[in-house]
Amino acid sequence: MPNLNSAHADLPGARRYFQAVQATLDAIVASQLERIDRAAALVSETIAAGGLVYLFGTGHSHMLAEEGHYRAGGLAAVCPILSPALMLHDGAVTSTALERTAGVSAPLLQRYQPTAQDLLFIFSNSGVNTAPVEAAQAAKALGLTVIAVISEAYAAQAPVGPLGCKLADLADLVLDNHGPPGDALVEIADTGLRTGPVSTIAGAFMLNAILTEATWRLAEQGQTPPVYISSNMPDAIAHNASLVERYRPRNPHL
């Protein structure tokens, strides 16, 4: 049983993080609802027309691509764009170098054979690294709609990369995750260091808000949204199997 009277019972670091995360989510709700509305409209229109919603990110942002993929309550029309080289488990230092290297994203995107009826979310906290910017360029060349999720504060101070533009310059719609430059929220005493990253929480919050609103709109239009059911719920196995059969030809991760 923990000692609630201990000197650390007030959890100063954790409480500062709780408060900063809540303030970030409040700021998103206060400022991004119009953009979330526009994004949800684009997603619902894409799915209604038979298109796919692709999700892409490098480094820790790749977790947001996986966030929307094959999960309970998730849309089966969502497909992540994943490359182990751009994630962290095969070598974090190498992936950091690769996300700043030209020529990586365009061939990766081609693997999925997207079409002009599809939509691509790109998550990039700084909005300047080469791989996400190149992904946007490649997607736009193929006629896809591109939605970027970035920290506008971070992107404003980050230098332009070798491609000569930032992700926000290419996207059809930009959403601001309201994270600070550098991502970390909590200053640690007088060390000059900060901890408590927020971009993953904020990105997942906005993505799921958009997908939930899009799903709601599909249902209001009389369509049955392609939503997965948790595998432990009644009738889930047959329901999910039908969705996998429907989307597997275009989603290599099913």
Image (cartoon, rainbow, N blue to C red):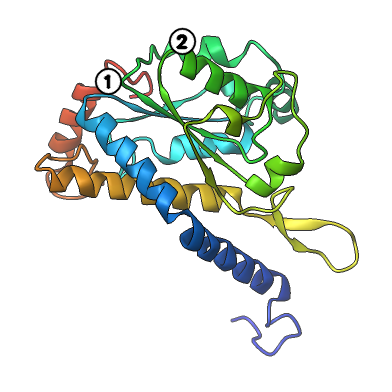
Q: Which residue is mark 1?
A: 248
Mark 2 Cα within 10 Å, few/some/many (few <14, many 20+)? few
Is residue 73 in view?
no
Give the mark, 2 or 1, whose residue is nearer the N terminus.
2
Mark 1 Cα within 10 Å, few/some/many (few <14, many 20+)? some
Mark 2 or mark 1, whichever is nearer to me:
2
Image quarter where the N terminus lies is: bottom right
Q: Which residue is mark 2?
A: 110
What amino acid is labelled 2 in the image? Gln
Is residue 152 in view?
yes
Q: Mark 2 and 1 residues: CB-CB less than 8 Å, in contact?
A: no
| Residue 33 against residue 12 in the figure, above or below | above
Residue at screen point 56% across, 50% down: 177
Residue 139 left/right relative to 42: right
Residue at screen point 53% across, 23% down: 136
Please state the horizontal and vertical placement of residue 12, each as a whole percent of the image: 72, 76
Please state the horizontal and vertical placement of residue 239, each as a whole percent of the image: 14, 37
Residue 212 left/right relative to 246: right
Please state the horizontal and vertical placement of residue 174, each as a whole percent of the image: 52, 40
Q: Secondary structure at mark 1?
A: loop
Residue 56 left/right relative to 189: left
Distance CA(mark 2)–CA(mark 1): 17 Å
Total marks drawn? 2
Label disc, if present, on residue 71 of the rendered structure: none
Q: Nearer the viewer, residue 230 or 168?
A: 168
Image quarter where the C terminus lies is: top left
Residue at screen point 26% across, 38% down: 44
What amino acid is labelled 1 in the image? Arg
Q: Quadrant of residue 154?
A: top right
| Residue 205 against residue 173 in the figure, above or below | below
